[in-house]
């Protein structure tokens, strides 16, 4: 793959197409991107009911990786490393009543880092520890609520920085995410169901020579979603048929656009909807569903890799699917 050198003469906010000549300036150092990752692992896990009220869970996973990446003409290798780790997981559940339960869990994570960009230093694997406590409650018949508090600490989290006009990669010392998640889901009536979520996440860099105290890139402090599904029942066209409709929205708050927190991405709300129709054909249920994503064709920016690499959200999409249940 060949990449052109960046051109600052084109205004993305007021674009005029067809006036720029075909470029003949190839950026040799940014061409021929390559990233190869090979990984394998095994895991085992078991849950034991000690009593009618107590359940314990324990697991162990082994991960190994080999990673290779780089870019340029001539090709320059930026990442070439291998590693492995045993990752534990444990948890406990206490059933106060058949409708109310409490849980706690501890787990570790391990993920290889690699980048085609120039590195300030080596990229060791990202490692983390996660603690979580929560409760699950059956609020009404068919409606459940889950509340969770979590604390996640990670080290060697990969970040991008812009130095002398060039994107470079390094790892942050330590980062920490603390927050709360609330989910409510279930049948509100015989024909109406709902799923509602809310999350508050405080994610900051806790140890780093340059960015200590900064908000983590692309992590929203507040996010929420709501989706409703209505079963309309039979249309009368054929015995056993059924029509359903649904709509909802998801909200994502403001996020830091880079590791230095020099700019932020605006918050956004995107709506989705669907309509489905199903019927029995020779004792098999056949279903057609039309999904409309980004219903109002909103322009939004879900993530950023720095001020020169801000991702644009997908425009309105129509997706038609068909399925058969055996």
Image (tube, grey):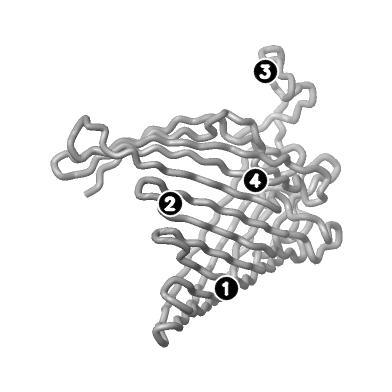
Q: CA distance from mark 1 to mark 4?
A: 27 Å
x 19%, y 44%: residue = 284
Looking at marks 1 and 3 on the same chain, the residue that comes earlier in the sequence is marked by 3
Does the rendering let one see residue 29?
Answer: no
Q: Are marks 1 and 3 in contact (CB under 8 Å)?
A: no
Q: CA distance from mark 4 to mark 2?
A: 25 Å
Q: Nearer the viewer, mark 3 or mark 2?
A: 2
Residue beneath disc 4:
252
Quarter residue 87 falls in: bottom right
Residue beneath disc 3:
22
Secondary structure beneath dot 4 equals strand
How many residues crowd around disc 3 within 10 Å: few (fewer than 14), some, or many (20 or more)?
A: few
Quarter residue 29 falls in: top right
Secondary structure beneath dot 3 equals loop
x 64%, y 62%: residue = 180
Q: Nearer the viewer, residue 72 or 177?
A: 177
Quarter residue 127 falls in: bottom right
Residue beneath disc 1:
107
């Amino acid at each position: 793959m060949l990449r052109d050198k960046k051109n600052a003469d084109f205004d993305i906010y007021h674009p005029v197409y067809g006036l720029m000549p075909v470029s003949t300036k190839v950026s040799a150092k940014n061409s021929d991107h390559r990233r190869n990752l090979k990984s394998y692992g095994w895991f085992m896990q078991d849950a034991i009911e000690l009593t009618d009220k107590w359940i314990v869970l324990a697991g162990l996973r082994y991960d190994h990786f080999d990673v290779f990446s780089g870019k340029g003409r001539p090709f320059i290798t930026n990442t070439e490393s291998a590693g492995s780790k045993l990752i534990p997981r444990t948890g406990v559940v206490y059933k106060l009543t058949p409708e109310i339960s409490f849980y706690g869990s501890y787990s570790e994570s391990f993920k290889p880092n690699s980048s085609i960009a120039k590195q300030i230093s080596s990229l060791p694997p990202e490692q983390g520890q996660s603690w979580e406590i929560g409760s699950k409650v059956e609020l009404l018949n068919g409606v459940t609520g889950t509340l969770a508090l979590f604390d996640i600490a990670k080290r060697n989290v990969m970040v991008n920085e812009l130095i002398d006009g060039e994107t470079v990669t390094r790892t942050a010392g330590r980062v920490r995410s603390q927050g709360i998640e609330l989910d409510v889901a279930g049948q509100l009536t015989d024909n109406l169901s709902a799923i509602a979520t809310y999350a508050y996440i405080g994610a900051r860099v806790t140890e780093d020579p340059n960015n200590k105290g900064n908000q983590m890139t692309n992590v929203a402090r507040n996010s929420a979603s709501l989706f409703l599904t209505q079963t309309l029942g039979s249309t009368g066209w054929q015995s056993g048929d059924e029509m359903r409709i649904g709509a909802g929205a998801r909200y994502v708050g403001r996020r830091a656009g880079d590791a230095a927190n020099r700019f932020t991405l605006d918050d956004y709300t995107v709506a989705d909807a669907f309509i489905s129709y199903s019927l029995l054909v020779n004792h098999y249920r056949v279903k057609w569903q039309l999904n409309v994503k980004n219903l109002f064709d909103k322009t939004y920016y879900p993530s950023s890799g720095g001020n020169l690499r801000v991702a644009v959200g997908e425009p309105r999409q129509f997706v038609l699917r068909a399925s058969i249940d055996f």
